[in-house]
Image (cartoon, rainbow, N blue to C red):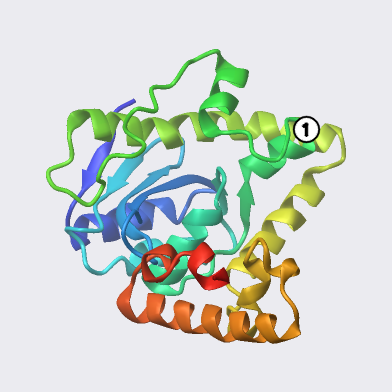
């Protein structure tokens, strides 16, 4: 599949004007978050069945035309395992997508478990075995390699072609609306403010503590999260869970 690498605002604007006429867009993101609390966006992939584009968010500081696509209720946006993509949209632009559906959720309603990976889904429908070796590369480093660009384009090329089959199968089982509802619940959860007073409940062994210890843990987890936000560090880089428990 031929793709277009978008590296300036004028090209992005023109591309998004074309995409605004689409009924369905397959979308994916590549990002890095190994040493930060917030994901650092490295690439956006979009395919409407005719034009496959790789949008460079490092070269383009104003991505508003793309964010407008995400909020266009007339376009269905399909992503696979979109939980972290939603975090990218939230932290990069506070952009809450509408009319979005997650193909992983659709696969779960077809009986394939709750966490079927993209490569496994592609192989299930097409027999093609994707090379996933580039998934953990540094997507913020420039220039991107040809192998990275090919890998990124495949993520939306197959997703677009598989989506109609997913719709047909979930409709046949009368589960399409359930998949849409479940996706929307995920969106709402990701865009709901984090309750810092309840973060201690996420510590695995908190149930072992008495009331006084739980109260201390409550304040510690709140402090840790505030420090992580302030310094843009993973929670474990501020202080690890076993240290909080100690």
Q: Position of residue 95 (x, y in %)?
A: 47, 71
Q: Quadrant of the N terminus?
A: top left
Residue nearer the viewer, 230 or 202: 202
* Crowding near the residue tagged with mark 1, few <14, some 14–19, many ≥20 C-alpha atoms within 10 Å: some
Residue nearer the viewer, 77 or 136: 136
Residue 114, visible in the rendered structure? yes
In this picture, residue 221 sits left or right of residue 60: right
Residue 195, visible in the rendered structure? no
Whether 67 is drawn above or below 227: the answer is above
Residue nearer the viewer, 136 or 93: 136
Whether 181 is drawn above or below 25: the answer is below
In this picture, residue 134 sits left or right of residue 236: left
Whether 214 is drawn above or below 158: the answer is below
x 33%, y 31%: residue: 151
Q: Position of residue 118 (x, y in %)?
A: 53, 33
Q: Which residue of the protein is positioned furthest toward the left in this rendering?
A: 143
Determine which residue is flagged by label 1: 110
x 54%, y 29%: residue: 161
In this picture, residue 55 sits left or right of residue 69: left
Number of marks in picture = 1
Whether 33 is drawn above or below 63: the answer is above
Residue nearer the viewer, 240 or 152: 240
Q: Position of residue 58 (x, y in %)?
A: 20, 58
């Amino acid at each position: 599949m031929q793709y277009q690498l978008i590296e300036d605002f004028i090209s992005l604007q023109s591309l998004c004007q074309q995409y605004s006429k689409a009924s369905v867009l397959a979308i994916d993101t590549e990002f890095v978050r190994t040493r930060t609390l917030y994901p650092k966006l490295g690439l956006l992939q979009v395919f409407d069945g005719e034009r496959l584009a790789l949008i460079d968010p490092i070269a383009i500081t104003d991505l508003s035309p793309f964010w407008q696509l995400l909020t266009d209720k007339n376009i269905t946006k399909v992503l696979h395992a979109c939980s972290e993509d939603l975090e990218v949209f939230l932290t990069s632009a506070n952009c809450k997508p509408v009319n979005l559906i997650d193909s992983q959720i659709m696969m779960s309603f077809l009986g394939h478990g709750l966490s079927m990976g993209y490569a496994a889904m592609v192989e299930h429908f097409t027999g093609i075995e994707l090379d996933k070796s580039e998934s953990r590369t540094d997507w913020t480093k420039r220039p991107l390699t040809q192998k990275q660009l090919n890998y990124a384009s495949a993520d939306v090329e197959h997703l677009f072609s598989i989506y109609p089959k997913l719709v047909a199968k979930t409709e046949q089982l009368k589960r399409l609306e359930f998949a849409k509802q479940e996706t929307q619940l995920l969106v709402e959860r990701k865009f709901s403010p984090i309750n810092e007073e309840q973060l201690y409940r996420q510590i695995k062994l908190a149930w072992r503590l008495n009331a006084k210890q739980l109260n201390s843990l409550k304040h510690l987890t709140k402090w840790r999260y505030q420090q992580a936000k302030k310094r843009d560090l993973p929670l474990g880089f501020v202080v690890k869970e076993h240290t909080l428990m100690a």
